[in-house]
Image (cartoon, coloured by chain):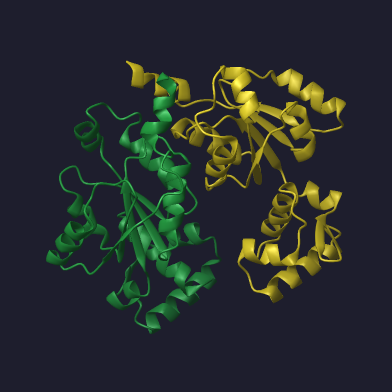
Chain colours: A green, B yellow
Amino acid sequence: MKKLDLLKAIFVASLEGQQVIKVGLLRTLDVPERELAKALGSLKKESLVEIGGRGVRLTPKGRRKLRVVFIGGTFEVIHAGHLYTIQQAKRLGDVLVVVVARDTTVRKRRNRKPLAPEEERVKVVGAIRQVDAAILGSETNIYDTLERVRPDIVALGYDQSHKEEEIAQEAKSRGIKLSVVRLGSPNPNLKTSKILAQLST
Amino acid sequence: MKKLDLLKAIFVASLEGQQVIKVGLLRTLDVPERELAKALGSLKKESLVEIGGRGVRLTPKGRRKLRVVFIGGTFEVIHAGHLYTIQQAKRLGDVLVVVVARDTTVRKRRNRKPLAPEEERVKVVGAIRQVDAAILGSETNIYDTLERVRPDIVALGYDQSHKEEEIAQEAKSRGIKLSVVRLGSPNPNLKTSKILAQLST
């Protein structure tokens, strides 16, 4: 087992709010128990994890071994444009966290009910191979989620309206050190709105 | 490395029409070269693979170690209903092959242009974690693809119009031994047509 894979699994499990116990890691990583115990022991020796009771946590030093990338979106349906963004974002780091907009947020922004409820949207996004964790956003403030994840990089889709400088500023004021990256698009027609508009023409 | 994972990787690569060379397997399986060589050697000793030149092939005995599941669909957009079907199908075997309908087939059946071209649809389906191989169907006959894959199980979505008996019969006449399974749906509203219909209400 690679050290990085274990650090990633611990980070992802803690993000999803699970108490990171060894049984969960065994299931995620699909390795024999002895091998996991040995790998955890050597991470502990390097002060990359803390092991207490049945729980495992990354130390700040352990967390710094990972480059965490953060993207967000509505993901009402999944199309090739999403995939392109996800693949580009994944290449920027070791762990890709995708934040899925809440139903209330979609209603506010699009002035209609989302095509699929949030719990379905987050499940579909989580099923994409390159996505390490898909989580629901906050209903009130996008920066709450940023504080929860504390990523190293925020990647913005080419058509997302968020301002790079504003995100960098807000992160800084919360003590989060991150870079904001604007991704490109292979094809501006790969947008949910344009794909769905075909149906009414 | 697990024996089954290596057999699966060889099957999938051969299905995608690649000459299965060791370099490709090293990339797919992400293991050191020595470990791969050792694993291939032991599969050869058990007559599960044939190694000739730089190519590796499953023997009929090797192929019988895998249970291959086959599903098909249009996959214009991906939603939670697709995911449910894919997850259910995956549980039926070791390798899940998903056949994506050609643009010509979609035009014939739905009397309109597909929402996304076939090369995008097959890429998106291939990005779903549980999908081992996503391939484009035949433009003329669904049974050509069945002959190419020679699955052990064909799984039908709850709303697919294909007849179980007809598939079983056609497979038999082509010398393919398989079972046909009808999957359930958690929620009949999880259909592309119903999801998209919300847009015009």
* For residue A82, above or below residue B26: above
* For residue B34, above or below residue A10: below
Quadrant placement of the C terminus of chain A: top left
Residue drawn at (23%, 50%), measured in percent from left and top? A162
Residue B164 lies in quadrant: top right
Q: Nearer the viewer, residue A62 or A88?
A: A88
Is A31 displayed left or right of A102 in the figure? right
Residue drawn at (66%, 62%), measured in percent from left and top? B2
Residue B141 visible in image = yes
Residue drawn at (76%, 58%), measured in percent from left and top? B20
Measuring from the top left, give residue B112's x and y in whole percent: 54, 20
* For residue B71, above or below residue A188: above
Residue A19 visible in image = no
Measuring from the top left, give residue B157's x and y in whole percent: 58, 26
Residue drawn at (63%, 61%), measured in percent from left and top? B28
Please count the marks in the image: 0
Residue B165 lies in quadrant: top right
Measuring from the top left, give residue B124's x and y in whole percent: 52, 42
Is B178 displayed left or right of B192 in the figure? right
Measuring from the top left, give residue B17's x and y in whole percent: 75, 49
Quadrant placement of the N terminus of chain A: bottom right
